Structure formats: structure tokens, C-alpha cells
Amino acid sequence: MITISEFAVEKIKEMLANEENPNMFLRVGVHPGGCSGFSYGMGLDDEETDQDVFVETGGLKVVVDKESIPHLAGLEIDYKESGMSGGFTISNPNATATCGCGASFRTALAEGKAEKCDD
């Protein structure tokens, strides 16, 4: 469902190690909004619901809500470093259109709810 590069897994594990809660995991999802219709959500969480599905990749627990799964099938997460900074990158094979910053997208089957873009 979701592929996370070894380097990105390493960075996420570093972030998890800095947390005081050993039950933390990575949550990935989408929600309506953004310039193109859907925005990605990615962060650390420690609460699951019956609407969540989890997978393990590289020893990392990743949780996705069931509504986001169709939009994220085949998603690839990587971490890129550039000079003094770095950040996560997302490649989504389901995206038929993305905004200029790459933070929002639209699929062939769902347009989401586009909002005014700041770029």
C-alpha cells in the first residue's frame, strides 16, 4: 500500500526516538482541501480507531484511516536532504493533478475540495 524509503524510515525512527511516548507511530492520510482538492497529512500519533488500518514497513508502524486508503495506494515517501535542510517527499501514482508546491492533489476518481492557493 505505502512504500517508505530506508532513509525516510531512519528519519522517522529518529523523530519517534525523541518522543517520550513509546506508543507513537506514523499516521499518513488525506483530507479535503489544498489547491488541488486533497491535502496530505503525515505526523506522529499514538491513538488508533476502528477506522484505521496499519502496516509495518522497515520495522515502522504506519497507520492510515480507511477513507484515505484509495487515495494513497502505491504512495512512496522519501526523505531528501538539500544543503542545510531536508524534508519528506511524496510520490503518489493516483494523483492526476498537483499544486505547485506538491502538497495537494486530485485523482481521476475524486476531486476533493479545492481551496484558493497561495503560490
Image: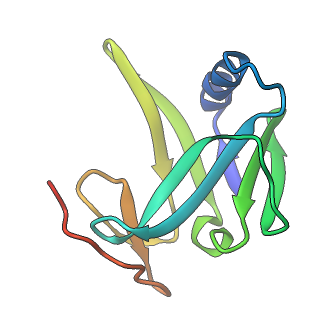
Which residue is painted at 82% across and 54% down in the image? Answer: 54
Residue 44 vertical placement versus 69 (above, below)? above
Which residue is painted at 62% across and 52% down in the image? Answer: 28
- Residue 44: x, y in percent? 65, 38
Image position of 108 (left or right of 58): left
Residue toward you, 32 or 110: 32
Kindly give the residue lying farthest to the bottom in the view shown.
109
- Residue 10: x, y in percent? 67, 22
Residue toward you, 68 or 102: 68
The C terminus is located in which quarter? bottom left
Residue 60 in which image quadrant: top right
Image position of 36 (left or right of 70): left
- Residue 17: x, y in percent? 72, 17
- Residue 81: x, y in percent? 41, 22
Kindly give the residue lying farthest to the top in the view shown.
84
The N terminus is located in which quarter? bottom right
Residue 8 vertical placement versus 68 (above, below)? above
| Colouring used for the render | rainbow
Which residue is painted at 64% across and 75% down in the image? Answer: 70
Residue 9 vertical placement versus 114 (above, below)? above
Kindly give the residue lying farthest to the left in the view shown.
119
Which residue is painted at 56% across and 47% down in the image? Answer: 42
Image position of 51 (left or right of 5): right
How many numbered discs? 0
